[in-house]
Image: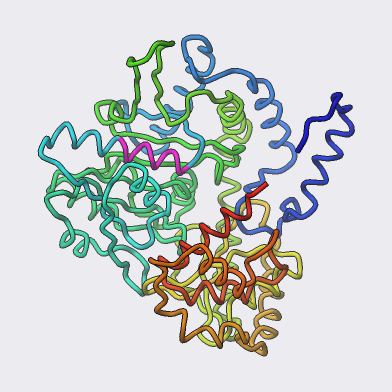
């Protein structure tokens, strides 16, 4: 982009911005099962107004913009009450689940550096279903990851396996409520007992479920305890921009008490400049997301959220009852919330996804890893309610069509070579050659992704990562 010699009129600006959207998914029609959580036009209007009201307020200094301090404290107080933290629980507003998780991992690391002076190589134990944000946090903060498998039938982590994995350098355990992949809740109470006995930090990642699960429990669902009511839980992450329907980015990182949260905070006095004290990763940040989150929570209200939860619960039950009735499809696990994973042992799921997407749906592919096969993921949101019958009807037809499709010449020919591929010594030229074979070259992506996903699915995880990093590095060249 080159700056125009003279500023453009407003209508030209918005005409150009609309053009940027032409290839985006059409999320407003209710057929997108991921990424966007739409509360409807009325709430969206309130959210946008509140966002704009605080667009220019800067969260860098809470003594200058005391309105933002008040908003953040009110949101954290809501989080403490909603997650049954009592009077001692504290928290902060963040840009999303990843930032919340990074902050919790930082707090745990710095807490144990202080408590255990002999600590040299801190470790975090992660089930294979723990969100990728924990791996990012470990990478950024120099923690060693000890990965443990999950039960191949329930996809929950096994507490005994976690116990056996703990070493003298382990500082942190993680459980999910629920896991993103299969929508099941890890045994947080059992993990809490281990954390107490071993003096470890337990984080419940409730980015997806922290807001919604208490409503499911009120509707009579058998939701196990996962929050601060569980002894041993030190911190939690709960997104507001998912099932609370607040605009992105809006999340809360919560702690059992302020003695733990203290280690999240960063201050710098070693420079010639203004005082730096950050309670999150970012310094300068718009007050818009915080104000919009406060506005949406108050606009919908408790009974409004309960009714939304009831409708979603009915939709999830209908979808999960319908999928196993479709020939060649099966659920990977019985979901405990609104996240559904299903697969096929005989039909290429990537072809099913392409066929569904060609009919105007968006459903998410997931590659195989460890004891979990490649599968299809649905995040059921309020805007998806009412589409259940059509979804199942199209899914049945698309599965039948995909059943008649071959695996693909490229996948067939590359299978023997790719399954044990080691790219540790690969050059950029080698990677570019693989990208070209997979169809990942040039600008953008093809309309049908089955061949590409099939190739990526064959690769071991380290090779996948290397190829994807190279691809994205090239994709964002100006």
Residue 336: where, in percent of width, then height?
Answer: 44, 60
State the count of labels: 0
Residue 478: where, in percent of width, then height?
Answer: 68, 46
Classified by dominant secondary structure, the portion drawn in magenta counts as helix
**Residue shown at the point (26%, 64%) measured from the top left:** 158
Q: Quadrant of the N terminus?
A: top right
**Residue shown at the point (64%, 19%) measured from the top left:** 56
Compared across the picture, whether 430 is left or right of 233 comes to right
Query: What segment is highlighted magenta in the picture?
Result: 97-106
Viewer-side residue, 146 vs 28: 146
- Colour basis: rainbow
Quadrant of the rendered image containing residue 475: bottom right
**Residue shown at the point (76%, 55%) measured from the top left:** 23
Compared across the picture, whether 329 is left or right of 372 comes to right
Q: Is residue 477 above or below residue 419?
A: above
Residue 355: where, in percent of width, then height?
Answer: 70, 75
Residue 167: where, in percent of width, then height?
Answer: 14, 54
Quadrant of the rendered image containing residue 377: bottom right
Residue 103 is a magenta residue: yes
Viewer-side residue, 219 vs 392: 392
Viewer-side residue, 61 vs 66: 61
Compared across the picture, whether 214 is left or right of 51 comes to left
**Residue shown at the point (53%, 12%) measured from the top left:** 65
Compared across the picture, whether 378 is left or right of 369 comes to right
Q: Is residue 415 above or below residue 193?
A: below
Residue 428 is a magenta residue: no
């Amino acid at each position: 982009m080159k700056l125009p010699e003279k500023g453009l009129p407003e209508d030209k600006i918005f005409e150009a911005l609309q053009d940027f959207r032409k290839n985006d998914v059409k999320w407003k029609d209710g057929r997108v099962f991921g990424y966007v959580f739409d509360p409807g036009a009325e709430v969206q209007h309130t959210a946008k107004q509140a966002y704009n009201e605080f667009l220019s307020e800067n969260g860098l200094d809470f003594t200058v913009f005391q309105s933002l301090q008040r908003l953040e404290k009110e949101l954290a107080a809501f989080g403490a009450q909603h997650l049954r933290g009592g009077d001692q629980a504290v928290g902060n507003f963040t840009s999303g689940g990843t930032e919340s998780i990074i902050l919790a991992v930082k707090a745990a690391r710095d807490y144990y550096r202080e408590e255990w002076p002999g600590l040299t190589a801190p470790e975090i134990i992660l089930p294979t279903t723990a969100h990728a944000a924990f791996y990012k946090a470990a990478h950024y903060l120099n923690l060693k990851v000890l990965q443990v498998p999950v039960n191949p039938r329930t996809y929950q982590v096994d507490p005994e396996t976690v116990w056996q994995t703990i070493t003298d350098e382990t500082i942190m355990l993680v459980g999910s409520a629920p896991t993103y992949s299969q929508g099941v809740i890890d045994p947080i109470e059992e993990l809490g007992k281990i954390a107490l006995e071993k003096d470890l930090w337990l984080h419940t990642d409730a980015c997806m479920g922290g807001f919604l699960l208490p409503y499911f429990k009120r509707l009579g669902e058998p939701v196990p305890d996962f929050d601060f009511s569980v002894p041993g839980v030190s911190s939690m992450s709960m997104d507001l921009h998912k099932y609370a329907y607040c605009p992105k980015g809006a999340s809360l990182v919560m702690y059992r008490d302020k003695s733990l949260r203290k280690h999240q905070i960063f201050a710098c006095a070693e420079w010639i400049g203004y005082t730096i004290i950050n309670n999150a990763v970012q310094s300068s940040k718009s007050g818009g997301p915080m104000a919009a989150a406060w506005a949406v929570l108050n606009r919908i209200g408790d009974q409004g959220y309960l009714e939304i939860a009831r409708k979603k619960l009915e939709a999830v039950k209908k979808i999960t009852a319908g999928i196993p009735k479709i020939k060649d499809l099966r659920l990977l696990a019985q979901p405990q919330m609104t996240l559904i994973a299903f697969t096929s042992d005989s039909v290429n799921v990537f072809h099913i996804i392409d066929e569904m997407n060609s009919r105007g749906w968006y459903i998410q592919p997931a590659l195989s890893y460890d004891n979990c096969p490649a599968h299809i993921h649905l995040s059921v949101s309020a805007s998806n309610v009412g589409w259940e019958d059509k979804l199942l009807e199209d899914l049945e037809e698309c599965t039948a069509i995909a059943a008649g499709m071959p695996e693909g010449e490229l996948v067939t020919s590359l299978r023997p070579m790719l399954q044990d591929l080691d790219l540790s010594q690969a050059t950029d030229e080698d990677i570019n050659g693989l990208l070209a074979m997979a169809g990942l070259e040039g600008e953008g992506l093809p309309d049908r992704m089955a061949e590409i996903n099939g190739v990526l699915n064959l690769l071991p995880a380290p090779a996948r990562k290397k190829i994807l990093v190279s691809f994205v590095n090239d994709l964002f060249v100006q």
